Image (spheres, grey):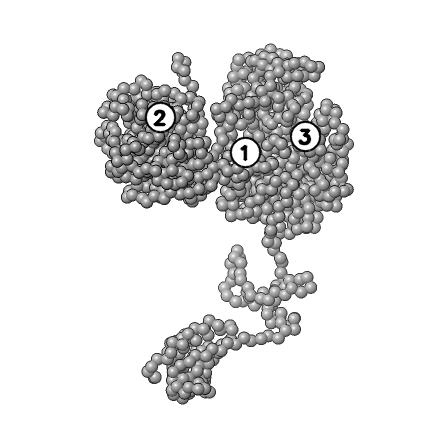
Amino acid sequence: GAGQDVGRSCILVSIAGKNVMLDCGMHMGYNDDRRFPDFSYITQNGRLTDFLDCVIISHFHLDHCGALPYFSEMVGYDGPIYMTHPTKAICPILLEDYRKITVDKKGETNFFTSQMIKDCMKKVVAVHLHQTVQVDEELEIKAYYAGHVLGAAMFQIKVGCESVVYTGDYNMTPDRHLGAAWIDKCRPDLLITESTYATTIRDSKRCRERDFLKKVHETVERGGKVLIPVFALGRAQELCILLETFWERMNLKAPIYFSTGLTEKANHYYKLFITWTNQKIRKTFVQRNMFEFKHIKAFDRAFADNPGPMVVFATPGMLHAGQSLQIFRKWAGNEKNMVIMPGYCVQGTVGHKILSGQRKLEMEGRQILEVKMQVEYMSFSAHADAKGIMQLIRQAEPRNVLLVHGEAKKMEFLKQKIEQEFHVSCFMPANGETTTILTNPCIPVDISLGLLKRETAIGPLPDAKKPKLMHGSLLMKDNSFRLVSPEQALKELGLAEHQLRFTCRVHIQDPRKEHETGLRVYNHLKGILKDYSVQHLPDGSITVESILIQATAHSEDQGTKVLLVSWTYQDEELGSYLTSLLKKGLPQSTP
Amino acid sequence: VCVAGYGQSDANEILQLIPPPTLLTKEAQGLCPERDFKVECGGFSERPVYSLKHVPDTSLLVTSGPPDSSIQIWQVSAEDSDVIKSVSTIAIENGTGQSWAKIATISARAPWVLHGSGLDRVQITEVESRKNVYTAASRGSEELSGLAFLDCNTLLLCCATGRLCLADMRQPQSLMEAMPVPSAPCREQWCMGTRHGAQGLELSSQPVARLSSRGLLTLTDLRKTTEFLALAKARVPSPGSGAEFLCVSWAPALEGYLAISGFDGLVHVYDTQSWDSSGREAEPVFVHKGHAFGRAGGSEDPPLVTVHTWHLQKPRTLLSAATDGSLHVWDWVQPCGKC
């Protein structure tokens, strides 16, 4: 995407023959086809239902779900779409809101309709946290808490023993109304993580909040009005709790307002999905509902003309339409007032213009608005930075990591850092690139009962947690894998067993008769190899355990005797040892 | 801003950070939301980084650290990569009892680095060719606590004992001894701070500050080394953790202001214009306490400020780092009456 904050997320994963689409976002900076993902990557013609096993949406931000109705209704997809319950509840509202502005205000034609949003949501299957959902016989998914915004989740996609975890947007530090992301040591083959903020080292939250509160306080103290344009859901709740706590602590009297409409519904959703908020809110909910504010009241249009200080949260967030723009026009001319932009603004919006320094704005009807109010910009977005990414990798222990980022970003350093610390491979493909990850899938093998019994009878009882080494023959026959004893394998395959035997010749100087040489060898070995069974057989040969030694005369030289040392391949070690021992020669004195 | 780690493990990072636009000198075109630093490039060092200097007018960094007196040269910002690459190491054999080299850089005739761990091992190496350009005459083997280029021909060396030595590169055999330190009952460690001025400014006219591990501050005019310009005492805790983080520096944009740190989690700022030679305790103009109060919970040792430096253009802005890995950028408000 063009800006760092806003892009369009859409990732395709093929795992063990299954195709999964992760997120389906819209780029808010473009007004043409570039705002939707390019689905021709999947197929050039026709509907996408046959090509995808499922679609997963991580959270309700438009850069992750904004293209969903276009994808399912205009391009064509009828398969399941998975998301969490809060996401399912809130998504259609945001989509409708954006549709209204794009079509009604801007007059766009190639856009999805209200009916399409409704039809799209009918295909959605809502999931709970940590619930394993069986998409089909082989594919299963599971959602994990991601922080970031209400209902945001990280998803694990598993087929057999191969798995991928997609993080969406997440936050590793808890804030005032949401907890921190968490995942168990699921050891996926691949972790796909957002890395837009990977090169950021965040200022301490305390400093950022203090700065924000200072600005609001100073404005209100001098009798000015503070306008904070927000999106209905997201950081607005965080800032509300922050201001409420501050007002309480400082015993301030100036009124704080939250504009009506969408935002009332927002608080309703937070109360409804209270289990998705953080620990502290849940614990104190019984005594005092964090979203029942004492100092924050519902706004009425008429209040904007009231004299005296006040703080107003109004939608929409980029000052591009609606109530926030109305209030802005009323207050812009007074230098005692302040507007604090809490997020990124798309080019073309009033928000973007004033942030670039413009102080004379052309409104509709050729009216010029002079902006004398103070303009401040503070980012309160909740994304994981490099430290957070490392933390998540430490939690999940993936075998490979893939960094998703904006275009042409240099992240070699982070890649090396991840590779060095965790000893995993790290990938960072650009938009449109394909990355292939090699996995080591486990192949199940049946073991014959006889072999199992035999192997467990040998040696001490195995430690339940440690793998035990077994010996057997692997038969791959008729699409099945079986581990059987060698004898059974031979029998099944109709093969004869062969015995391998080695014979080594050792020359020693000895003019005596073979029989006497043999006796010498026997006595010598008997004396040295006290722990072994050394036998002298009637025919003159010597055995050491199962190894046979025979003394024969050399064909040409009477003074040399040849010792034949013979052993089966299983006795290799002892055979080699005996050979080298005998090569050293026999002691001179003969007992 | 470059920062580096000095841990015992073999993976210490060197990072080049871009400060938030509000801290950059250019007036920002529009407003920016950023209060965050961005990692522009990063690299890995096998040894702990005790000293880190940028070579002016180049994209090179020089680092040094235990276990020996060698120095490492790094290349920052290649076109296509954000990795700080190690370019070369200039290996120096260790003298007895000396551990790591102190460094200073200049780019007057060519990019040079002045380095040495002891008084008998001071040399200047040309960074790109790695050739030795100058070796200082030896006047003892004391450990050095700092060195500086006063101008492109004059070097100032400070020993841990407090002894200052001047060397003129044009007269290689001579090493002039400057002012010794006030005698002290117990042994203390000293470090020095020289004023960075624009190149061309007569730097030897700027006083040299020395700071001891007991908090004594001396100001010396190098043209008149027989007496102290000023002598003062800072109110600091008695030396506990040693003198390895002692740091004194002059403000580049405020006449007569200096800052000290390294005793605890605080940074003191002083206006030396009111000082005399009495050695009295001086009142700081401001004390930055952020590092001491920054952490939540008191389970570990309180952080110690490891180094501080002044913002080159913004008059009352400083940067400081501490043992808990924090980096602070801060300023103070002057009470009415002063600019």
Badge number at residue A30: 3
Residue A180: image quadrant is top right
Q: Is there any visible trace of residue A301 in the rendered image?
A: yes
Foreground: disc 3 or disc 2: 2
**Quadrant where the image shows the C terminus of chain A:** bottom left
Residue occupying the point 43% across, 73% down = A577
CA gap, disc 2 and disc 1: 44 Å
* Image location of residue A567, percent across then percent down: 49, 76
- Do the residues marked 1 and 3 share a common chain? yes
Residue occupying the point 58% across, 15% down = A373
Chain of the residue under label 1: A
Disc 1 residue crowd, few under 14, some 14–19, many 20+, Cα 10 Å: some
Chain of the residue under label 3: A
Badge number at residue B313: none
- Do the residues marked 2 and 1 share a common chain? no
Foreground: disc 2 or disc 1: 2
Q: Residue furthest top?
A: A307
Looking at the image, is mark 1 or mark 3 earlier in the sequence?
Answer: 3
Image position of A38 (left or right of A449): right
Residue corresponding to mark 1: A174
CA gap, disc 3 and disc 2: 52 Å
Q: Residue furthest bottom?
A: A513
State the SS at label 2. loop
Q: How many labels were placed on the picture? A: 3
Residue corresponding to mark 2: B195
Amino acid at pointer 1? Pro
Q: Nearer the viewer, residue A176 or A52?
A: A52
